[in-house]
Amino acid sequence: MAIPPSLCIDNLKKALDAAEIGQHPVEVHGALVGLICGGVEQDNQTWVGPLIDLMNDGKALESNLLQLITELYQDTVTRLVDFEFGFTLLLPEEEVSLSHRVEALSLWTQSFLTGIAIIQPKLNQASDDVKEVIKDLAEIAQVEFDVGDDEESEAAYIELQEFVRMAAILCYSEFGPEPEMDNTETTQTVH
């Protein structure tokens, strides 16, 4: 069973604060997803080095914090690989004010773009769809607008959040590892 985002954010925030790392949990998740969607090697801990560079200027992380981030990494990869698990952005839940959620989405998107840019040297050679999505994400990352607590603003936020989520999935489908083919279904016995 998945951990609710609010619980995950709270636990990660406590660990980041204890380690005196001035990152918000949404920034950590955004960078992590950017690395994954940029095609970082998934078979080993290759993602740890670039993430530590982004988060903590290359200095090692405390074991508790690294464990939380490793669990977040594994959960994120699982969700990206298998759509049944439903990939989601690690963002505050709807009880948090809309202005804080918009700010968190902007931070997540900025971190995602940084993560994907450092791990994917061929970003400028991506498909036209990915280039356009990256351009749109850069605009979303800079979003600064007064948000009212009305249904229209809430709907706009949900639409932006879904766009960012789908953009990450698109990047993963382009740069992530090739899906493994299951030969058990395709193998047939000829009589």
Image (cartoon, rainbow, N blue to C red):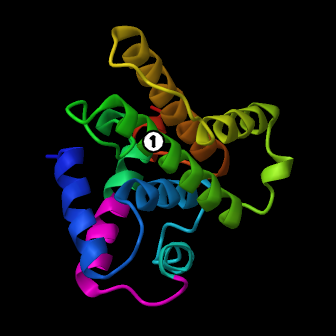
The answer to whether 73 is drawn above or below residue 59 in the figure is above
Dot 1: element: helix
Read off the magenta span: 57-74
Residue 79 counted in the magenta span:
no
Toward the right, the furthest residue is 125
Q: Residue 169: percent from the left, percent from the top?
A: 53, 38
Q: Residue furthest bottom?
A: 59
Q: Which residue in the rendered view is the most extreme toward the top?
A: 152
Classify 10 Å Cα crowding around label 1: few (below 14), some (14-19), many (20 and above): some
Q: Residue at x 42, y 56 (%)?
A: 29
* Camera sees residue 65: yes
Residue 64 on the magenta span: yes
Q: Total of numbered circles in the picture?
A: 1
Q: Is residue 133 above or below residue 107?
A: above
In percent of the image, x 48 and y 73: which residue is there?
Answer: 55
Closer to the camera, 149 or 79? 149
Q: Type of residue at label 1?
A: Glu
The image quadrant of residue 168 is top right
Residue at screen point 74% across, 37% down = 135
Q: 92 and 45: which one is in front? A: 92
Looking at the figure, which quarter contains the C terminus? Answer: top left
**Image position, residue 113 (x, y; %):** 63, 52
Determine if residue 189 is in view: no
Q: Position of residue 66 (x, y in %)?
A: 32, 78
Residue 152, quarter of the rendered image: top left
Q: Is residue 130 left or right of residue 161?
A: right
Residue 171 appears in which quarter of the rendering? top right
Residue denoted by label 1? 103
